[in-house]
Amino acid sequence: MITEIKSPRLFLRKMNFLDKAQLFEIWSDPEVTKYMNIDRFTSMKQVEEMIQLFDTLSQNNEAIRYSIIEADSEEIIGTCGFNAIDYDNVKAEIGYDLRRKYWGKGYAAEAITSLIHYAFNDLNINRVEAKIEPENRNSIKLIERLGFIYEGTLREAEKSKGQFINLKLYSKLASDK
């Protein structure tokens, strides 16, 4: 898998330990982690463990997470990537988060569009999935604007923050381009 992806305003680079201070700022914000399957981080050790987890998954070609860097400021403004890659079934699940001050400015759409392009054109993935909590209306609007199709609700599909949650399943196929 490639470790860098560029778009007009962003640079996606595989997460690494040099990113940990800025990632802690993002993942310690309760508004950012509200709909993530993690509690807000309270220690740098949690960030290090997350980076290590994604590094191990990346080495095994099972997942990859990128730091989203705004090209002008060189600030890490969020993360995105493939939470899971299933080469047998030629599909991947995406995930993303963004520093709160960058919400509503098109950065998430730009980052996800770059990921989708990479998935379809370089990894030869046929299906990209997004699983979103029903209450996360902004993420749902974003995914729908990017041409993802709602397939249904997965009832009590994951345990998050101590309780089972429903997830709305969205997908985009290579043929949807």
Image (cartoon, rainbow, N blue to C red):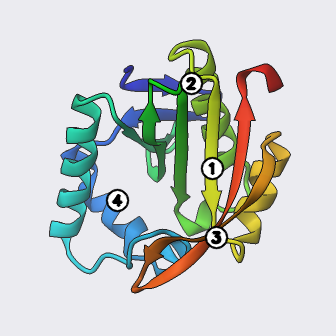
Residue 93 location, x and y as percent?
53, 43
**Quarter of the image where the C terminus is located:** top right
Q: Give the residue at x 53% y 13%.
A: 122
Which residue, given by chain and number where applicable, does mark 2 sit on? 119
Q: Give the residue at x 26% y 61%.
A: 21
Bin the neighbour count of mark 4 within 10 Å (Cα to Cα): few under 14, some 14-19, many 20 and up: many
Q: Give the residue at x 38% y 79%.
A: 39
For residue 146, side relative to residue 88 (left or right): right
Instruction: In the displayed orientation, state which residue is furthest to the left.
Output: 45
Bin the neighbour count of mark 3 within 10 Å (Cα to Cα): few under 14, some 14-19, many 20 and up: some
Which residue, given by chain and number where applicable, does mark 1 sit on? 130
| SS for dot 2 | helix
Which residue, given by chain and number where applicable, does mark 4 sit on? 23
| SS for dot 4 | helix
Going from N to C along the chain, the mark reached first, 2 or 4, is 4
Bin the neighbour count of mark 1 within 10 Å (Cα to Cα): few under 14, some 14-19, many 20 and up: many
Q: CA distance from mark 2 to mark 3?
A: 23 Å
Going from N to C along the chain, the mark reached first, 1 or 2, is 2
Q: CA distance from mark 3 to mark 1?
A: 10 Å
Q: Are marks 2 and 3 in contact (CB under 8 Å)?
A: no
Q: Is residue 14 above or below residue 76?
A: above
Residue 40 location, x and y as percent?
38, 78
Which residue, given by chain and number where applicable, does mark 3 sit on? 133
Q: Is residue 30 visible?
A: yes
The residue closer to the viewer here, 98 or 150, is 150
Amino acid type for the residue under numbered disc 3: Glu
